[in-house]
């Protein structure tokens, strides 16, 4: 929408109405009814200029803690300065965060399945791989138990661990959830903090996950290439999720049948049920896993970036609406087709560019939101939402004053914008705000069409949700079975987390412009509303609201 009056002067105040002719007044009144303030239309072109810088080979894929990330961060800070936005970190625009990185040394590591006392070695990379998200114990030997989806959801009276003895054993989990579970609920209970707690409460000392072949964003062939890259966790012990868990392995579904031999069940049967989100059986497996691991551990630091557009209303200016995007990506890795730089143009130079573009345009247009806007660029999203987790737990503004997070991660403007997918649409009053902002721009919204992919907890909004802050994320949407869906799926399989997510891919600037219009309208709508956003009374995530 974004009506422009007086040769582009974007700021409309009621006092100015008397200066207008009747016709102009009517159009102004209409604009004012839609949004109290107006910003210029976005066309996607300025956005692409930012993407070109952030996803340039020179940024080397913006790996957390790397010189490439530091260059990207310095560029972002320069732009924010140029835009006249205030620093709002605890070191100028920066909020430094300390990390521990872990990398597997496969030459000193091994994995074997022991059946009837006979060990059978497992080929790392081919059949299975260690996950270094978990601080792996040097040695583990334990019996295996298949725990289905590995979910314990009291709200649904659902517990995969019921009746199983997991004391000192390793749980085997098939990723996914039964259809009776809403995507928000299923996503929450599959997050690492919840996963670790369930395993620990059940007495397990480790776990093997078998990805659901029906919901694998990245084919195994590409997953295995990343297995020796470092994982990270926050150095501050208050964020240590994995206490007591010493083994984490991801199993290639193509080689999963061997885990079920002699159990009376087959993996084919399990995968068929899981594909349809049917209930899964749980049972002990007649097998022991034997693991030896060697880790290379390092300490490092990387920064979040925080800038502020101060609010104008004396009552509301102390409150903050956060616009967030992760700046980090995967850095330099195993080459694919001769290219080793994982540029992350869509993931997530695109979101960082959108936040920069909106910050720039709002400030340049002299827009004065009632609440303050906080522009947040977080690090280490790719390592498990770590930068945002740190910021949401230890924000550089008072935690109680953060009223909303609007996150943008890989919004995929690679198809025309006919619809917006809103993650968290049914959870808080922000859902209706998003619906309205989209409608004002002639676009419909839809909830998450692919609950199996857990998008709601797979980006930084989730860090805010866990601190009680109503949040959402949006993407360019498509309907099931449409050609747009085919384009998006092809992108996921070919470019997601691959070096080809670079500047040599087609993007739709018109779709981007409209998406930015919606995002900017939404941010202003929330910033100017008399009441702060609130969780819906039936939202599962309302439970965290006390944490603020
Ligand atoms: Zn990513």
Image (cartoon, grey):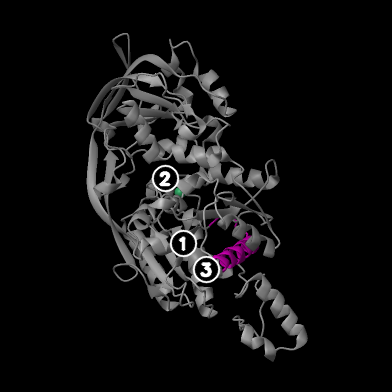
Residue 403, labelled with which disc? 1
Q: Is residue 28 above or below residue 289?
A: below
What distance separates the C-alpha of mark 3 from that of mark 2? 44 Å
Q: Quadrant of residue 511?
A: bottom right
Mark 3 or mark 2, whichever is nearer to me: 3
Which range is magenta?
504-526
- Mark 1, other Cα within 10 Å: few <14 / some 14–19 / many ≥20: many
Q: In the image, is residue 520 part of the stretch drawn in magenta?
A: yes
Q: Is residue 538 above or below residue 366?
A: above
Mark 2 or mark 1, whichever is nearer to me: 1
Q: Is residue 76 among what the camera can see?
A: yes
Q: Is residue 19 above or below residue 512?
A: below
User: The residue tagged with tag 2: helix, strand or loop?
Assistant: strand
Image x and y of residue 232, in percent? 31, 46
The residue beneath circle 2 is 335
In the drawing, does residue 91 fall left or right of residue 59? left
In the drawing, does residue 102 fall left or right of residue 465? left
Image x and y of residue 108, in percent? 23, 31
Determine if the C-beta at disc 3 is less than 8 A from ligand 1. Answer: no
The residue beneath circle 3 is 527
């Amino acid at each position: 929408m974004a009506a422009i009056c007086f040769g582009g002067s974007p700021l409309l105040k009621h006092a100015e109405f008397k200066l207008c002719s009747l016709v102009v007044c009517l159009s102004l009144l209409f604009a004012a009814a839609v949004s109290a303030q107006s910003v210029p239309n976005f066309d996607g072109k300025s956005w692409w200029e930012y993407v070109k810088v952030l996803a340039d080979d020179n940024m080397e894929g913006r790996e957390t803690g790397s010189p490439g990330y530091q260059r990207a961060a310095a560029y972002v800070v320069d732009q924010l300065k140029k835009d006249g936005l205030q620093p709002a970190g605890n070191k100028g625009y920066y909020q430094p965060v300390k990390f521990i990185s872990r990398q597997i040394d496969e030459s000193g590591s091994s994995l074997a399945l022991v059946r009837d006392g006979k060990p059978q070695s497992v080929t790392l990379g081919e059949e299975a791989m260690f996950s270094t998200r978990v601080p792996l114990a040097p040695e583990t030997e334990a019996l295996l138990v298949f725990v289905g989806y590995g979910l314990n959801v009291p709200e649904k009276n659902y517990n995969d661990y019921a009746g199983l003895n997991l004391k000192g054993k390793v749980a085997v989990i098939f990723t996914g959830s039964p259809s009776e579970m809403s995507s928000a609920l299923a996503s929450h209970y599959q997050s690492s903090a919840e996963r670790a707690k369930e395993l620990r409460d059940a007495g397990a000392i480790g776990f093997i996950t078998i990805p659901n072949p029906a919901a694998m964003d990245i084919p195994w062939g590409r997953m295995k290439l990343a297995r020796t890259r470092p994982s990270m966790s926050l150095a501050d012990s208050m964020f240590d999720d994995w206490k007591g868990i010493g083994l984490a392995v991801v199993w290639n579904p193509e080689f999963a049948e061997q885990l079920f031999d002699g159990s009376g069940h087959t993996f084919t049967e399990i995968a068929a049920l899981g594909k349809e989100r049917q209930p899964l059986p749980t049972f002990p497996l007649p097998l022991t896993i034997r693991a030896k691991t060697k880790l290379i551990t390092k300490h490092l630091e990387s920064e979040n970036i925080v800038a502020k557009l101060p609010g104008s209303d004396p009552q509301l200016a102390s409150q903050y609406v956060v616009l967030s995007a992760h700046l980090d990506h995967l850095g330099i890795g195993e080459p694919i087709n001769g290219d080793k730089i994982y540029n992350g143009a869509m993931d997530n130079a695109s979101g960082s560019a959108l936040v920069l573009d909106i910050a720039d345009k709002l400030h340049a247009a002299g827009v004065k939101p009632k609440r303050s806007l906080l522009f947040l660029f977080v690090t280490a999203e790719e390592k498990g939402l770590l930068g945002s987790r740190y910021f949401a737990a230890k924000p550089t503004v008072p935690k109680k004053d953060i009223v909303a997070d609007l996150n943008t991660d890989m919004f995929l403007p690679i198809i025309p914008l006919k619809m917006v997918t809103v993650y968290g649409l049914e959870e808080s009053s922000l859902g209706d705000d998003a619906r309205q902002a989209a409608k004002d721009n002639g676009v419909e919204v839809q909830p998450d069409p692919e609950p199996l992919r857990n998008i709601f907890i797979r980006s930084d909004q989730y860090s805010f949700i866990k601190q009680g802050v109503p949040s959402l994320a949006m993407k360019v949407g498509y309907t099931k079975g449409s050609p747009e869906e085919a384009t998006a799926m092809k992108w996921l399989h070919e470019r997601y987390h691959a070096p080809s997510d670079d500047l040599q891919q087609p993007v739709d600037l018109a779709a981007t412009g409209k998406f930015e219009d919606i995002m900017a309208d939404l941010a202003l709508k929330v910033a100017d509303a008399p009441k702060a956003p609130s969780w819906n009374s039936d939202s599962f995530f309302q439970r965290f609201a006390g944490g603020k």
